[in-house]
Amino acid sequence: MKAARLIVALFLLGLSLAATAQSIPSPRFDELERRLQIRPEQKEQYEMAVGATKRALLAVGLSVMEMKQRLAEELAKPNPDFSVLFDGADRAFEQQRPLLEEAGRDWKKLYALLDDKQVEVVKQFLLDSLGQIGAAPFIQDAPRKRPKSPPTGEWV
């Protein structure tokens, strides 16, 4: 029984270490700025969006590290209570929601200043850097490509 618990504990600890390593993304915003060819009138809002995103990602990363610590402490107990960990994870991400929403608002303001090509570059960069789930708060309000109008008149 103790051997099985030890194996499960080591497996869960390994998963948490892998999740920690993968969950703290570090996008190269300098590369994005270069690719976007930011105009002077866009620069201030771009810096605000990037700053808000960095703050949000740092806060999420710290929360993940705290969860990892709680997991290790819980696994050290003779009878670990995993429900405590799941409840803590929900609270940790809920605490970061305001930072994620702030960053999302700043990206939305930036999107209003960007042309369609720049918006597509930003969306693709965020998806590549953060993945679908990680990028969602920052691209959910991005304008969609507008469909081309159908030709008017009759076909000859």
Image (tube, rainbow, N blue to C red):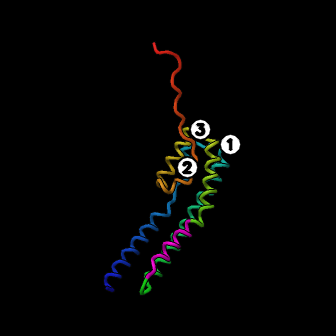
Q: Give the quadrant of the C terminus.
A: top left
Of 7 and 36, nearer the camera is 7
The residue that mark 1 highlights is 41
Which is nearer the N-term, disc 3 or disc 1?
1
Question: Residue drawn at (33%, 79%), measured in percent from left and top?
Answer: 7
Inter-mark Cα distance, 3 to 1: 13 Å
The residue shown at (42%, 85%) is 79
| Structural crowding at the residue carrying mark 2, measured as other residues with C-alpha within 10 Å and reported as few (<14), some (14–19) or many (≥20) | few
- Residue for badge 2: 140
Q: Position of residue 36 (x, y in %)?
A: 56, 43
- Mark 2 vs mark 1, foreground winner is 2
* Callout 2 secondary element: loop
The disc, 2 or 3, on the residue closer to the chain's N-terminal end is: 3
The foreground one among 128 and 102 is: 102
Q: Which of the labelled discs sits on residue 115, or is there none? A: 3
Q: CA distance from mark 2 to mark 3?
A: 17 Å
| Image quadrant where one finds the N terminus | bottom left
The quadrant holding residue 103 is bottom right
> Disc 2 to disc 1, how far (Cα)?
23 Å
Tell me where the magenta segment starts and ends, as one range: 80-93
- Counting residues from the start of the chain, the first of labels 2 and 1 encountered is 1
